[in-house]
Image (spheres, helix red, strand yellow):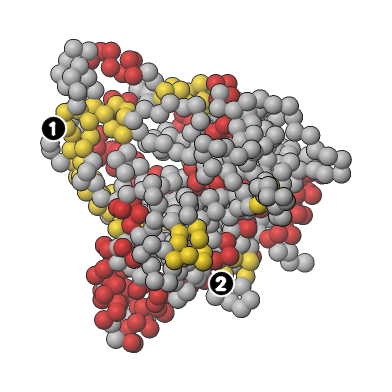
Amino acid sequence: MKTTPRNSIVIACIIAISSGCDSGSKPASINPGSKKPGKVIAKHKIPPGESENRTTNKFRNSLIKMDTDLNFLRLQGEWVFATPFNKHDGLGDGPINPKNKVQPGGRLTLPAFPSENGKAAEGNKFFLRVNGLDSQTCVECHFIVNNSTVPAKFGVGGVGGVAATAFPATTRFLPASQGPKSIDAANFNGRVINPPFVFGSGGVELLAKEMTENLHQQLRDASNPPEIGKPVHLKTHGVDFGFVTWKKTGENNSVEEVPDTKTNCDAMDKKNKKMVTLEHFIAISPAAKLYAWTGSSDYGTRVEVKSSEMTAKHKGQSPGLELDTKNLKGVDGDLVIKPFGRKGNNVTTRDFDCGALRFHMGMEPVEIVGKDNDNDGDGVVNEITIAELSALSIFNTTTPRPNQDKYTGPGVKVFNDIGCSGCHVPVMKTERHILPYQQPEQPQHPFDNRNKYYEVDLVNSSANFEVDPDNSDGMLVKLFSDLKRYDMGHRLQESLTSASTEENRTYITARLWGVADTAPYMHDGRATTLTEAIKWHGGDADAARNKFIALSDSKKVDLLNYLRSLHTPTPEELVIN
């Protein structure tokens, strides 16, 4: 009997529990100092007849090893992705935080009506839909595999549609009140997020890691020794990111500095330096460390190297140098490609998930808040363990890639002629096909083995990427993107009060693979057709949009037919055996 993806989860869950399968019994080591942000409290008590919903209890404190079965890890990750967490799992925030009612930990929730005797309404404790607290499970926002059929086809990891729209960073949402400069739009500020699918994200993550590594290598090669004011041009995988230069900094510091990278998974008590030295940035051998690593080889704790250790030998010398990044294009000054999130601000799926779990569900990862810490004050500790987050990352990055029908029509030429392929690059090639996983992650050292706990062959696994015919070690990633950020014009500008105009207008190039099956389009779902999506382009995409508008009707049809050859995986491909 053929089972649906949801049935496969249930059946496999029964098999796993009955067989007592476990990847190991040794718990992951956690930074003892990370208890600082929250407080240790008594164990949450579950009323008689109730229980947690989580299905990973036998796995959640395991140590993932290099030889742990991939399908087993994928199944654990799918359970994390698809489990509807409840209050006993840690769903939701704790008491309202009067000083910050927007960030995870103490957010306002919908009122539980009715109010009585003029007293303020009691919150429902879990949901608001604005600024998060909008779901119990990842699959609530990622469940439509194919939206081009009637009825739609469903499965774990798909898009969400408008009903699953999220509204982060919102402080004003008055649906019956006009905006300050609007004739017919509601009064709103913040972001609107149309949930994308996760298919093929392993290839995207590997490609971004390689691009990061190559940009850093170009900087190292050109900075030995650094030359003040000389442009260092940065281009990788065919994508031009502009140039950087070295400039002088303060006295008594001859160290060359580059920006550091922060992720959503950083421990809350981590004291981030704004800069790291080029000397440590290079980190060619284990002796030249950017960070010191403690704990087990699988789950180390990142400890910052003291600035005094970096600068002691340079005391009394000439002014140092720092990287001038104002001429970079489409990448941050840390030279780390961040392919996830519509703004291109998440390094890996793990980085994205750390933020998403806290934002959407109030589920606090241990690696952020620390072991046994109730950071959000909801009475539950260790809500998402390191092993669970690692398995979730492995599941996301081993989902099957989208695919393309065989297409030989004239739409390819139209796509190229009007300039779409300049940003929506049809195929990017990687130099390898093995994706490594780190914890904690080292964004500026993506292939450093010191904190690697697992790796996956993206060609010979469920990800099913194609080998590069010109390089058997590499593979083809047919994502239709260059992983670069662009100004998309004032009509796509968002209204975050905490962001600059430039930041509100900037987006990473959308990946078009699967576009035939995933309407509505654009970052906020405003376009219900491909033609609408193209016409909403602006800013750096003005020229391509105008050329599309000027096309003859027949050529427009050719282009749209080409785009409709780009499909998502089938629901059958998503089943984990």
What residue is shown with label 2? 147
Label 1 element class: loop
Give above or below for 341 relative to 277: below
Q: Position of residue 177 (x, y in %)?
A: 48, 65
Give the image location of residue 76, x and y in percent: 66, 45
- Residue at x 35% of width, y 54% of height: 504
User: Toward the viewer: 269 or 215?
Assistant: 269
| In the image, residue 474 above or below residue 516 | above
Identify the residue at horizontal 22%, vertical 43% (top origin). 326
Residue 224 sits above or below residue 469 on the image: above
**Type of the residue with mark 1:** Ile
Corner quadrant of residue 239: bottom left
How far across and down, in percent of the image, does residue 74 sit? 62, 48
Seen from the viewer's position, the closer of residues 196 and 505 is: 505
Towards the viewer: 64 or 183 = 183
Q: Position of residue 506 (x, y in %)?
A: 33, 55
Q: Is residue 23 left or right of residue 323?
A: right
User: Which of the labelled discs sits on residue 143, or is there none?
Assistant: none
Does 4 sit left or right of 471 as displayed? right
In which quadrant of the rendered image does the N terminus lie?
A: bottom right
Q: Mark 2 falls on what kind of element?
A: loop
Q: Callout 1: 10 Å neighbours few (<14), some, many (20+)?
A: some
The residue shown at (27%, 71%) is 544
- Residue extending farthest to the front is 117
Q: Which residue is mark 1?
A: 228
Neighbour class for label 2 at 10 Å: few (<14), some, many (≥20)? many
Instruction: Please name the amino acid that badge 2 sits on.
Output: Asn
- Regarding residue 275, the answer to whether it shows in the image is yes
Estimate the spatial distance between the alpha carbons at disc 2 and disc 1, rounded to whole Å. Answer: 54 Å
